[in-house]
Amino acid sequence: NAGVTQTPKFQVLKTGQSMTLQCAQDMNHEYMSWYRQDPGMGLRLIHYSVGAGITDQGEVPNGYNVSRSTTEDFPLRLLSAAPSQTSVYFCASSYRFGDQYFGPGTRLTVT
Amino acid sequence: GEDVEQSLFLSVREGDSSVINCTYTDSSSTYLYWYKQEPGAGLQLLTYIFSNMDMKQDQRLTVLLNKKDKHLSLRIADTQTGDSAIYFCAERYGQNFVFGPGTRLSVLP
């Protein structure tokens, strides 16, 4: 199993550009989530999904969209990037009430 | 809302024990977790404890849970340089997790 994979590893965007961060898992986990990590603030939940076709907002959803058309994939879209979205983004997956497994992260810089 | 707090930094000498502390607010948490993050990497699950337990030991790691004070600790015995990392405490809140800010452990030779 590859586990949880994320692409790209690094990305630089200009303010106002859009992009999609990719996340995939091959463990047949129902639950997937996106976090952002900022210094001194731990991980904050952006969006999550409990299964294909079902998504919900987390603590900091503004400026981000998600969709879950398959069990394996959970992309995160930045519609119009802002400098405040400079962060490290982690995708995670688990069985519904199981332990979470994290991807390696995407480091995003918005100038 | 739910909140998890940790001190941000801890330094210990190689061979000593490290104790990383965490407090949480949700008394209905079912599981509490410790994750380790090495530089440039994702989070790795280290261990967890079910809320009806007081202690869990796993090789060099000991987790202590004081439910009355909502206090969780992680003790690493015989700390090595490879233990240098950021350690995150997390509580399960329903289907989601709430993470603390992380404690950066530095191991001095």
Image (cartoon, rainbow, N blue to C red):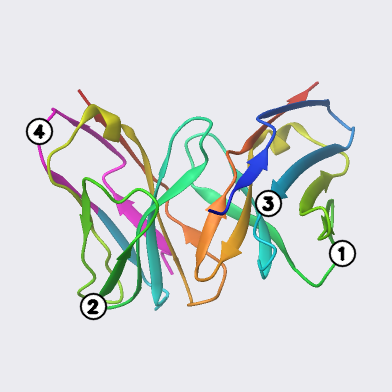
Please give left or right for residue A96 compared with residue B74 in the image.
Answer: left
Q: CA distance from mark 1 to mark 4?
A: 50 Å
A65 up-or-down from B104: above or below: below
The disc at residue A16 is: 4
| Parent chain of label 1 | B
Task: Quarter of the image for the C terminus of chain A: give it.
Answer: top left
**Which of the pair B14/A99 is nearer the observer?**
A99
Discs 3 and 4 carry the same chain letter: no
Discs 2 and 4 carry the same chain letter: yes
Q: Amino acid at mark 3?
A: Tyr
Query: Mark 2 highlights which residue?
Result: A53
Q: Check whether the beta carbons of the residues at disc 2 and disc 4 lie within 8 A of each other.
A: no
Dot 4: what SS? loop
Provide the residue span drawn in magenta.
A1-21
Query: Mark 3 highlights which residue?
Result: B24
Q: CA distance from mark 1 to mark 2?
A: 39 Å
Tell me what residue is drawn at x 53 percent, y 31 percent. Answer: A40
Residue A5 magenta: yes
Residue A78 at what x, y percent from top left? 18, 46
Q: Check whether the beta carbons of the residues at disc 3 and disc 4 lie within 8 A of each other.
A: no
Discs 3 and 2 carry the same chain letter: no
| Parent chain of label 4 | A
